[in-house]
Each structure stands twice: as C-alpha cells, then as structure tokens.
Amino acid sequence: MFLGFNKSETKFVLAILLIIMATTLLNLRISYRKSRDAQRKNDVRAIHDALQAYNNEFGSYPISTSDGLILACDPIITETTIIEYKPCQWYEDGLFNPFKKDAEPYLARILGDPRQGQGRSYFYISTGKHFQILASLESEKEAEFSFSIKARNLPCGKYICNFGRSDSEKTPLDKSLLTYENELRILEEERLKIIYGK
C-alpha cells in the first residue's frame, strides 16, 4: 500500500499522471513554437518597414550580400559619398542614415531569428530596386507558410526559407528578383513597341 492505494491503483494513478505530463509538455512545445513563429513574422514586418523608410530617404533599398545579409552597415564615407558598406549582422547592427548621425535609426538593431544560435537565420535579397526578406517558420500549419517560397530552396541558416515579405505586393516571393525584373523589362519593351510601333 502506498498512500492508501493498492499496487494496481498506484499504477493507474501514475499512468494518468504520466499522460497529463506528456500532454502538458507537448502543448508547451507547440506554444513555444507558435510564439517563435509569431516573433519571426513580427521581425520580418519590422525589417520590411525599416527598409521602406531607408528607401524613402535614399531612393533605393540596401543591396544584399550573396549570403543573405543587408549591405548597409559601418560605411566608409567622404563628406558626400559612401564608398563602401559592410554586411549588417543580424542582432548586432542597426540600420540608419550615416549622413544624419543624430537622426532616429530606421532600426536600432536589425532583428534576427529567435533561434539564431541554433542554425536559423533570416535571408535578405535585394537588387536595390526591389527586395525580399525571408524566414523559416517552424510549422507548416501557419497561415503564412509558403510552399512556393520553400520550393526556391533558399537557406535561412540550416533551414529552408518558407515565409517572407517583399518591397510591395506586386513583387513576388516565389521567384528571384532578377527573373522578376527581367519580366518587367520585357513587358516594358513590349509596351514601348506598341506605343511607338517598332
């Protein structure tokens, strides 16, 4: 007898407690995953808004590095010209106007994935004219999860990007910016042929 229970009753109570514990742990893991995915969506929106503010001031978006970083930090500048930028590191650097030192930064710290230290990262692509900021959501059940973005097979750290935002609703996320800009160029050439009859 243990606390007034016989052996079979004790086993039954322990089984119930184990089921409750397992269910609680599973729900807790799901809750944490949803929280991290919500944070990723908010981060991407904040970075998107900061890049829009940058574009409003400079007339273009910061270009990207081949490994998906924003190329807009630690500028080497003369009085009126920026000679060179260094890649911004997620979670470390801010996005600001180097010619207005006292101005409010576009983003005091460029946000990084909540699991940055565990192989997850955001991925930025920009030609200066358009941009895409991508992330990897942990759950395919999220409404914003995109199989078409995932099909591009872009690296968000050790994971594949499957969510993102672009500079406008017209700029697609399911194809490269070079492909999109080439399509726009062809459409413009066709439009001009119609107008000028050439």
Image (spheres, grey):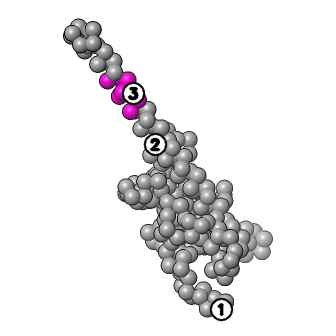
Q: Secondary structure at mark 2?
A: helix
Q: Earlier in the sequence, mark 2 or mark 3?
A: 3
Query: Does 102 appear above or below 121?
Result: below
Q: Is residue 153 left or right of residue 105?
A: left
Q: Is residue 102 left or right of residue 135?
A: right
Q: Position of residue 42 (x, y in %)?
A: 58, 52
Q: Secondary structure at mark 3?
A: helix
| Residue 39 numbered mark, or none | none
Q: Secondary structure at mark 1?
A: loop
| Residue 23 numbered mark, or none | 3
Whole-number angstrom distance, CA of label 2 to CA of label 1: 47 Å
**Residue 73 position by quadrant:** bottom right
Position of the N terminus by quadrant: top left
The answer to which of 104 and 58 lies nearer the viewer is 104
Disc 3 packing (10 Å; few <14; some 14–19; many ≥20): few
**Residue 77 position by quadrant:** bottom right
The magenta stretch spans residue 23: yes
Q: Earlier in the sequence, mark 2 or mark 1?
A: 2
Q: Residue at (61%, 66%) from the top-left corner?
A: 107
Q: Position of residue 158 (x, y in %)?
A: 37, 57
On the image, numbered disc 1 is attached to which residue?
A: 79
The answer to which of 15 and 172 lies nearer the viewer is 15
Q: Which residues are magenta?
A: 18-25
On the image, numbered disc 2 is attached to which residue?
A: 33
Please, what is the three-letter code of the amino acid marked with disc 2? Answer: Arg
Q: Residue at (41%, 38%) from the top-left corner?
A: 29
State whether residue 92 appears in this view. yes
Please, what is the three-letter code of the amino acid marked with disc 3? Answer: Thr
Query: Does 27 appear above or below 56?
Result: above
Disc 2 packing (10 Å; few <14; some 14–19; many ≥20): some
